[in-house]
């Protein structure tokens, strides 16, 4: 026995776990860079590459930039931001509340009051703009007191008009607002939002994952050293390095996400680093969603400029016409005769269309939007905390799952490189 121990190259043996530990640390450290950086694609375009990529295996097509004809890199998480947005809606936001619930959280009565406050000073300008466009002669012929009387009557109807607008939005919000499309668009336009969700909440866990890369690599290096000493084959270290690199990344991902609920293994309890802090993650997630995604500002923009923008405008304009008629008062019939039915109807419709833009504009007031965001934040935080742990994990992992193979391949390549480097420095095992 003593003779065998004397023959062991202890420097070679001891340095293997140290090497695999350092490589494991480097794998997880560089893996985090691959996950999150850069936020936008960095690389070069290659003519014809996009066409070639379409006939390559599906997994290869998933490499960021390849389908767009580029050789380079984009962080896995930002590259899949839109997909995470889609799954986040399916798994979480759809369960957080309907469009109507989100709208009600924004307190339509306060929105109406804010619209009146913002719109009322502009009313004389709006009336004059419409009248000069539709019937300039009539407007010029009116004495100053007549113009003022018309403006005063329209302004008197403004609270009722605005209340009608907010009521109509609330009544049809499920058809006018698509939270899934809104979230996907926001995540696609600003992939850094998804990066922030991970980093603002999970910075401590991600640092721990890097540290555990050394631990996993060192522990896996012990049996590698034994096998290397037993079989004395020069090619073992690079091959086993591939396995160690792959396993290090796989264990790191498992450490973060699995299991979603506490699970007992004898005297030990396993629980994923992210799901064990679901309540804290919910607060971070809700803050980002309420401040940057489902905001009053974005809701207003989506209502007027989204896929159903034309329907929103028509709905609101139609809702305003009775109030405009009331503003004309007893003189309505006489004015209709004086200017003609067609011209009178054009004035009504033009005033309604201008009013639609003016009544939605306060939705895009950043300060007012921030004030209302606290309501959305509370709703999203509460519902996210109530999500089943498996759904919560799926929501967080959605941006990574399809591309995890790239991380494992990256770990395997670095493990192979570490094995070759050790071989070059210390030679073969015996």
Image (cartoon, rainbow, N blue to C red):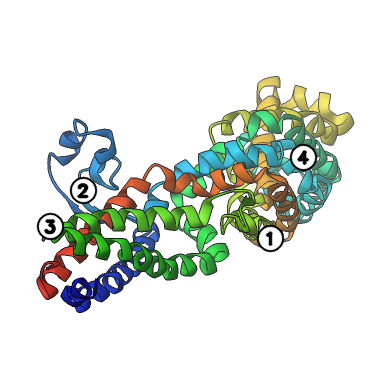
- How packed mark 3 is, by other alpha carbons closer than 10 Å (few <14, some 14-19, many 20 or more), is some
- Residue closer to the observer: 306 or 207: 207
In x, y percent, where is residue 390?
A: 60, 43
Residue 3 falls in which quadrant of the image?
A: bottom left
In x, y percent, where is residue 8?
A: 19, 73
Residue at the disc numbered 2: 70
Q: Which of label 3 and label 2 is nearer to you?
A: 3
Write the residue at 53% across / 39% down: 87
Residue at the disc numbered 1: 370
Write the residue at 77% across / 39% down: 166
Look at the image and tell me in which quarter the C terminus lies: bottom left
Q: Label 1 to label 2, Cα distance in Å?
A: 39 Å
- Residue closer to the observer: 322 or 345: 322
> Which numbered disc, 1 or 4, marks the residue that appears first in the sequence?
4
> Which numbered disc, 4 or 2, marks the residue that appears first in the sequence?
2
Q: Label 4 to label 2, Cα distance in Å?
A: 47 Å
Indicate which disc residue 235 carries: 3
User: Is residue 197 at least partly visible in the picture?
Assistant: yes
In x, y percent, where is residue 354?
A: 64, 40
Residue at the disc numbered 4: 166
Residue 216 falls in which quadrant of the image?
A: bottom left
Q: Which of label 1 and label 4 is nearer to you?
A: 1
> Which numbered disc, 3 or 1, marks the residue that appears first in the sequence?
3
């Amino acid at each position: 026995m003593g003779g065998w121990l004397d023959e062991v190259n202890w420097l070679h043996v001891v340095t293997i776990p140290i090497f695999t530990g350092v490589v494991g640390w480097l794998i997880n450290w560089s893996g985090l860079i691959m996950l999150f950086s850069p936020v936008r694609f960095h690389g070069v375009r290659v003519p014809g590459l996009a066409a070639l990529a379409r006939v390559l295996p599906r997994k290869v097509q998933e490499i960021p930039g390849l389908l767009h004809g580029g050789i380079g890199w984009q962080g896995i998480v930002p590259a899949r931001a839109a997909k995470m947005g889609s799954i986040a809606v399916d798994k979480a936001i759809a369960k957080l509340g309907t469009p109507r619930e989100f709208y009600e959280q924004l307190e339509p009565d306060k929105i109406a009051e804010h619209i009146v406050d913002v719109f009322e000073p502009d009313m004389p300008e709006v009336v004059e703009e419409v009248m000069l466009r539709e019937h300039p002669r009539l407007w010029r012929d009116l004495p100053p007191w007549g113009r003022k009387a018309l403006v005063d009557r329209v302004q008197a109807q403004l609270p009722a008009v605005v209340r009608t607008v907010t009521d109509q939005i609330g009544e049809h919000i499920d058809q006018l607002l698509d939270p899934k499309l809104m979230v996907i668009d926001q995540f696609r336009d600003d992939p850094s939002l998804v990066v922030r969700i991970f980093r603002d909440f999970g910075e401590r866990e991600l640092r721990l994952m890097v540290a555990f890369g050394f631990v996993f690599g060192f522990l896996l290096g012990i049996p590698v050293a034994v096998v290397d000493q037993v079989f004395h084959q020069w090619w073992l270290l690079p091959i086993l390095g591939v396995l160690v690199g792959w396993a290090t990344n796989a264990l790191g991902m498992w450490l973060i996400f699995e299991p979603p609920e506490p699970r007992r293994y004898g005297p030990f309890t396993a629980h994923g680093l992210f799901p064990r802090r679901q309540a804290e993650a919910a607060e971070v997630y809700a803050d980002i969603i309420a401040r940057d995604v489902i905001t009053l500002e974005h809701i207003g923009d989506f209502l007027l400029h989204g896929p159903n923008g034309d329907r929103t405008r028509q709905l609101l304009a139609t809702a305003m016409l009775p109030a405009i008629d009331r503003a004309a008062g007893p003189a309505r019939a006489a004015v209709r005769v004086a200017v003609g039915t067609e011209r009178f109807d054009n004035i009504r419709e033009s005033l309604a269309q201008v009013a639609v833009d003016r009544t939605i504009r306060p939705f895009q007031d950043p300060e007012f939007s921030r004030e209302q965001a606290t309501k959305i934040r509370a709703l999203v935080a509460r519902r996210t905390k109530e999500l089943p742990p498996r759904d919560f994990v799926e929501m967080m992992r959605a941006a990574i799952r399809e591309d995890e193979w790239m991380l494992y391949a990256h770990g395997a390549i670095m493990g192979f490189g570490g094995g070759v480097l050790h071989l070059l420095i210390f030679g073969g095992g015996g």
